Amino acid sequence: MWFFSKKKQLEFPDFWWAYEEHFKHPLPELIKDNTFIVLDTETTGFNLTKDRMLCIGALKLKDNNIVVKDSFEVYIEQEHYDVGSAEIHGILKKSKRNRTSELEALKQFLVYIENHVLVGHHVMFDVNMINAALKRNGLPKLKNENLDTESLYKRTLLISTVVQKKDRYTLDDLAKKFSISRKDRHTALGDAFITAIAFLRTIEKLKSKKLKDLIRKQGPLRFGL
């Protein structure tokens, strides 16, 4: 059994081993010294088995700044298509966008994110969609730490006894709260940009200095926009 397990492990592509290599180095202790990857996926639906990613969009945050020139956006070829979800994300089946294979998109994404902390609104949905794609292509799950902007935002409300709290907060709720433009809402890169600003505003309110103060056990997987 050990022999076959070892043989299978060695069949992983070079880009996976390059990704894993980054995790030999610990993340910086202070938030300001870390790079964060703010991501969003546009998908054909919410079913992790049947649905597929149409697009992955991501931005890097360094020293509390969005590095716009170092953004990531990739559209993915796929056979599955849902007309209903197209009304939300606007990605048409026969659009002229350049698209790449799912495996190539994953390769590019892993090169981009390295070992940095992933940030998203209801981030576990995006992480699990990416993990499902990795599994389809014979690869292990993502190894990155992750932060959910909804969970972090809720922690800012614990300080206040005035604000009436809700069970959940959408990205639109956070955009309204922080007066963020929703011009490119429901595009992967547009939603990543809104999430990035909301994240920066939220951690400013939390006044945390160390990364470990932000990273806590994530709640249950949530769906929704």
Image (cartoon, rainbow, N blue to C red):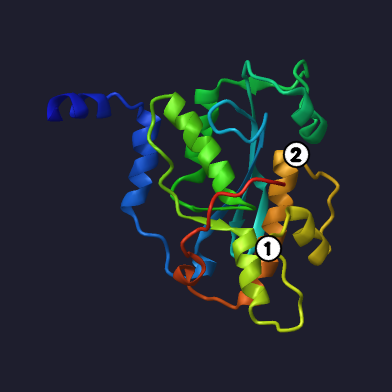
| Residue closest to the eye, 157 or 177 | 157
Q: Is residue 116 above or below residue 131?
A: below
| Residue closest to the eye, 93 or 106 | 93
Q: Is residue 31 above or below residue 5?
A: below
Q: Is residue 35 left or right of residue 25?
A: right
Residue 10 location, x and y as percent? 25, 27
Q: Is residue 32 above or below residue 77?
A: below
Q: Is residue 12 left or right of residue 94?
A: left
Q: Is residue 42 above or below residue 153?
A: above
| Residue closest to the eye, 209 or 94 | 94
Callout in the foreground (2, 1): 1
Q: Name the residue tied to disc 2.
A: 187
Q: Residues within 10 Å of mark 1 (few under 14, many from 20)?
A: few
Q: Is residue 221 left or right of residue 28?
A: right
Q: Are marks 2 and 1 in contact (CB under 8 Å)?
A: no
Q: Name the residue tied to disc 1.
A: 167
Tell me what residue is drawn at x 60 percent, y 78 percent: 207
Is residue 72 at all visible to an observer of this figure? Answer: no
Q: Which corner quadrant of the image does residue 17 belong to?
A: top left
